[in-house]
Image (spheres, rainbow, N blue to C red):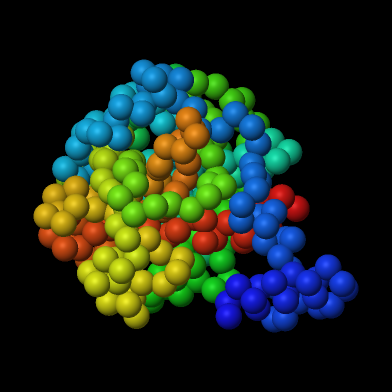
Amino acid sequence: MRIFSVLVLLWGLAHGHPARRGVDLAQISRSRYDKIDAPGCGQRPLAPGNGVSELVSRIMGGKESIPYSWPAMCSFRTTDAPDQHKCGGNLVRNLAGQYYLITTAHCVPDPKASLYEAHCGIHDRADSSEPNRVILYFNHAAVHANHNPWTYDYDIAVLRVITSVTTSNYISAVCIPNEGWYPNNSAIAVGWGSLGSAGVSPYKLHQVTKPIKSRPVCEERYGSASITLRMLCAGLPEGGVDSCEGDSGGPLYTYIENRWTLTGLSSWGYGCGIAGRPGVYADIIELKDWINLQINV
């Protein structure tokens, strides 16, 4: 029945009939499954073998990253407190090569772009003398109109970079996914967040490897009413590895077609590293249509 309905809809589009519910299948295809970012993304020149071996290693329960080996990762801050790390941020480039930064909506409570800055090309968030540090500023911030600050649904924001950026080994873009994730995909969360609940936040960038959970498992852990289609979970049943406070907006990376891809954004969870409570991430592939509208205008 569902297949028949889709075929009827496609026939109607081909013959000039309006799509039901305003669905434009051609637009969805371009933004959901086709590439919407510039070539050359997802490389880690300072990590041996592009870092793929790190997917089998074991933030909280993790380890310090190879210095400067995540060139798309930035420390997102406010301009009135530039020395204080607030959230993670992820550099992407649109089809024209313009840089943008993607983070979670709850990290951007006021969508006034001039309130924020991002420190990129760094390893030690507190070391202002790092030679490759670049501070990025923005002239536009878009927070998803459907973002719910209570449920964390649609937890995504995109900021347009106005600072001149030279792509290098230390600063470059992560890829936006062209396909969805699969249960048990090995993924890496990266950030400067706490190493445990109510714990100390490290100065140096950390990472942890963990599997993405199936949607039924995610719903079982938190209740189906709490997990929307814009969310995914990642973690181990026994806990012990997780993103934590200060990691919000940071990435959940997967390795697809020899490139690092931004599969999720650290969004929320119950505590940090608690057994049976995986971290919850904004699901980028489900939000890709909206991202496309923000960066390719």
Frontmost residue, 23 versus 169: 23
Front-lying residue, 145 or 95: 95
Residue 76, horizontal then vertical, whole percent: 44, 46
Q: In the picture shown, does residue 292 fall above or below 126?
A: below
**Can residue 137 be spotted in the picture?**
no
Q: Is residue 103 left or right of residue 252?
A: right
Residue at 60%, 44% in the rendered image = 100
Using the rendered image of the protein, determine whether residue 10 is visible from the camera's viewpoint: yes
Residue under the point 73% across and 75% down: 9
The quadrant of the rendering that contains the N terminus is bottom right
* Residue pictured at 60% horizontal, 73% vertical: 3
* Rendered image quadrant of residue 278: bottom left
**Quadrant of residue 232 in the image?**
bottom left
Residue 111 image position (x, y, % from top left):
57, 62
Where is residue 157 shown, x and y percent of the image?
Answer: 53, 58
Q: Judge from the rendering whether residue 11 lies leftward or rightward of residue 128; answer left or right.
A: right
